[in-house]
Image (spheres, rainbow, N blue to C red):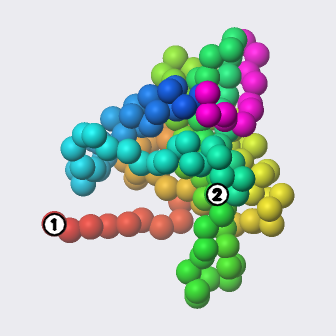
Amino acid sequence: MEKVIIREAVVQDLPVLLHFEQELIKAERPFDPTIAHDPVSYYDIEAYIEDDTIKVMVAEVDGVVVSSGYALKKEARSYLDHQFYGYLGFMYTETSYRGKGINKMIVDYLVDWCRSKGLNEIRLTVYDENDPALNAYKKAGFKKHLCEMRIV
């Protein structure tokens, strides 16, 4: 495999990151009928990049950004044994680069960043039917914790 560079995202990465966001939304639509019709955006990626309390990372291969993810600090519910936790999101890897451990490299970096901020509880959300994502996060050390259910 080519050399993978994990680095902080910069505003110049915005076009590819906005593309990743739309690909992520497209991939999640089959799992979630409540996602609104296009145009839809999950994140304010530019604001995340410029916010020094949020860490947006990308993986680059041969000068091309192929994967992304972010970590941020969230306030926990008042009844939990921790006041804050690290939350990971915007995990996307280009199809041709999946299965090569690139997502795990980003997750490992973001987990380390969270821990450096004193955030030892680290969470992310994933659709229960998204087996490839579930398997990737299990390989990275995550365990299922809650299952959200709904009725319409």
Q: Which residues are magenta?
A: 1-12
Amino acid type, residue under disc 2 in the picture: Leu
Judge whether residue 148 can be spotted in this image. yes
Relative to the observer, which residue lies in front, 26 or 21? 21
- Residue at 59% across / 23% down in the picture? 66
Q: Is 36 a magenta residue?
A: no
Q: Is residue 15 above or below residue 87?
A: above
Disc 2 crowd, CA 10 A, few/some/many (<14, 14-19, 20+): many
Judge whether residue 122 can be spotted in this image. no
Q: Is residue 109 left or right of residue 144?
A: right
Q: Is residue 78 above or below residue 72?
A: below
- Which picture quadrant has residue 150? bottom left
Disc 1 crowd, CA 10 A, few/some/many (<14, 14-19, 20+): few
- Residue at 61% across / 67% down in the picture? 74
Mark 2 residue element: strand
Relative to the observer, which residue lies in front, 36 or 119? 36
Identify the residue under disc 1.
152
How far from the left and from the top, in percent, is residue 139? 64, 43
**In the image as oriented, which residue stretches furthest toward the left?**
152
How far from the left and from the top, in percent, is residue 60? 68, 22
Find out whether the residues at labels 1 and 2 contact each other: C-beta distance under 8 Å: no
Mark 1 residue element: loop
- Residue at 58% across / 88% down in the picture? 79
**In the image as oriented, which residue stretches furthest toward the right?**
116
Split into 4 quadrants, where in the image is the N terminus? top right
Amino acid type, residue under disc 1 in the picture: Val
Identify the residue under disc 2.
72
Q: Is residue 89 above or below residue 149?
A: above
How far from the left and from the top, in percent, is residue 45? 53, 43
Camera-nearest label, 1 or 2 = 2
Q: Is residue 124 left or right of residue 4?
A: left
